[in-house]
Image (cartoon, grey):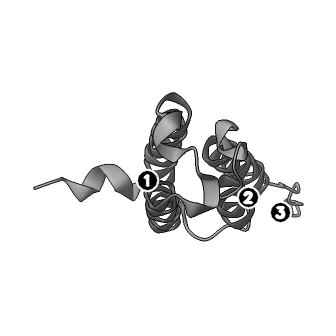
Amino acid sequence: MLDDSFLKSPRSRFRAAMVLAIVADAVQILIFPLFAEGAISPLDDILDLTVMVALIRLIGWHWEFLPSFIAELVPGLDLVPFWTLAVVNVYRKWKRVEAAVHVIDVEPLERKLPNR
């Protein structure tokens, strides 16, 4: 059975999402003849739906997944690595938020010295 402790940290979840997105895009680009029909290809639709659901389970819902899913249905556009671009964009935004959260603003405290 798979150890879920690997997927507990957000960074590990993003790594897994990136691997999934790259593999899905590579399958659609390298095995193009199977997915050449675009929106009418059931294999392509199943792959895209599976990838979208898996990405949502890994890193949560992000609006970038919806345009990626729709673009993958258009014939010829599945040659663009939309899943990878979506995960990279979500990761970039997550890093920006994480950096803002870890900023610590320290104000000096005034010390009262005892009167002598």
Give percent across and percent down for residue 44.
50, 54
The residue at 43%/53% (across/down) is 9
What is the CA distance from the residue labelled 3 to the residue labelled 1?
48 Å
User: Quarter-wise, where is residue 110 in the image?
Assistant: bottom right
Residue 62 lies, with reference to residue 19, above or below; the image says below
Nearest to the observer: residue 61 or residue 12: 61
Q: Could you say which disc has been placed on residue 101 in the image?
A: 2
Instruction: Give whichever of discs 1 and 2 has the lower sequence position.
Output: 1
Nearest to the observer: residue 113 or residue 89: 89
Mark 3, residue position: 114
Label 2: few (<14), some or many (≥20) within 10 Å? few
Residue 108 left/right relative to 46: right
Determine the secondary structure under disc 1.
Answer: loop
What is the CA distance from the residue labelled 1 to the residue labelled 2?
16 Å
Q: Nearer the viewer, mark 3 or mark 1?
A: 1
Nearest to the observer: residue 44 or residue 66: 44
The residue at 47%/68% (across/down) is 53
- Amino acid type of disc 1? Ser
Q: Could you say which disc has been placed on residue 9 in the image?
A: 1
Give percent across and percent down for residue 114.
83, 63
Q: How many marks?
A: 3
Instruction: Give whichever of discs 2 and 3 has the lower sequence position.
Output: 2
What is the CA distance from the residue labelled 2 to the residue labelled 3?
37 Å
Return the residue found at the far left: 1
Give percent across and percent down for residue 15.
48, 41
